[in-house]
Image (cartoon, rainbow, N blue to C red):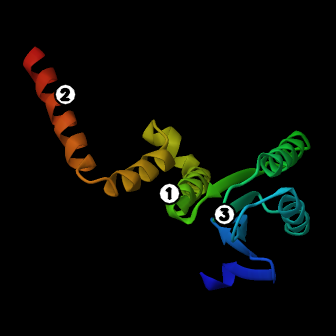
Amino acid sequence: PERGIEARASSGEGEAQMLAEVCGEQFLFVLRDGDFNAADARRALESEAETHSAHLVVVATGKIQDEARMRLREHARRRSRAGGGMEVVFVEGVETAPAELRQALERVSQAALTRELYELDASAGFNVGYMLAERFRLVHRTGALQDLAASAAGSLAGSLREI
């Protein structure tokens, strides 16, 4: 919902920030038109310190420099050691953004499903949250459900022949 999205102050140098809540977890998006360097990483870390976001997503139309990557990864490691997890996602080029963002959002939504449905796991005998997440993932792959059904039918037919 829109109430879970907040546009933050953007600089005049081709940088914008956005804060979004997804499945109860905070995402800080740092968008950079051009290369993302160490100074940009410092500003991103200042914003992360203000927001305490669990996920920092850097999207740059240019290259994300190695020093910037190193600073952000080191900060994430320090936060993890202190007991607060933080994920950093790097996206170079706008064309790769949809796939990278989809993966990050799927991880968060699968974790939320697992948290919400864990009580059903014992009675079902399997991870219900994972099963639902996988079901939705299969729907988006052309023919994946048909392949899965054909494989299951083949296994069942083979088992019946053994009897």
Q: Give amino acid for label 2.
A: Ser
Label 1 vs label 2: CA separation? 33 Å
Q: Secondary structure at mark 2?
A: helix
Q: Which mark is residue 155?
A: 2
Among the two numbered marks 2 and 3 on one chain, the one whose residue lies closer to the N terminus: 3
Horizontal side of 53 relative to 5 (left or right) equals: right
State which tag comes first along the sequence, 3 or 1: 3
Residue 57 visible, this angle: yes
Q: Which residue position holds label 1? A: 99
Q: Amino acid at mark 3?
A: Val
Q: Position of residue 75 (x, y in %)?
A: 87, 48
Does 9 sit above or below residue 57? below
Q: For the view shown, which residue lies furthest in the left direction?
A: 161
Q: Nearer the viewer, residue 160 or 19?
A: 19
Number of callouts in the render? 3
Kindly indicate the quadrant of the structure image that contains residue 105.
Answer: bottom right
**Placement of 126 over or under 118, stated as above or below:** above
Residue at numbered disc 3: 59
Residue at 72%, 75% in the rendered image: 18
The amino acid type found where label 1 is placed reads Ala
Which quarter shows the C terminus? top left
Q: Quadrant of the N terminus?
A: bottom right
SS for dot 3: strand
Disc 2 and disc 3 in contact, CB within 8 angstroms: no
Residue 163 visible to an observer of this rendering? no
Q: Residue at x 66, y 61 (%)?
A: 62
Could you give the CA–CA distance between mark 2 and mark 3, rounded to whole angstroms?
A: 44 Å
- At x 55%, y 52%, the residue is 110
Instruction: Work out how far the residue at label 3 is from the one at label 1, CA to CA, in angstroms.
Output: 12 Å
Question: Tag 1, which secondary structure?
Answer: helix
148 relative to 129, above or below: above
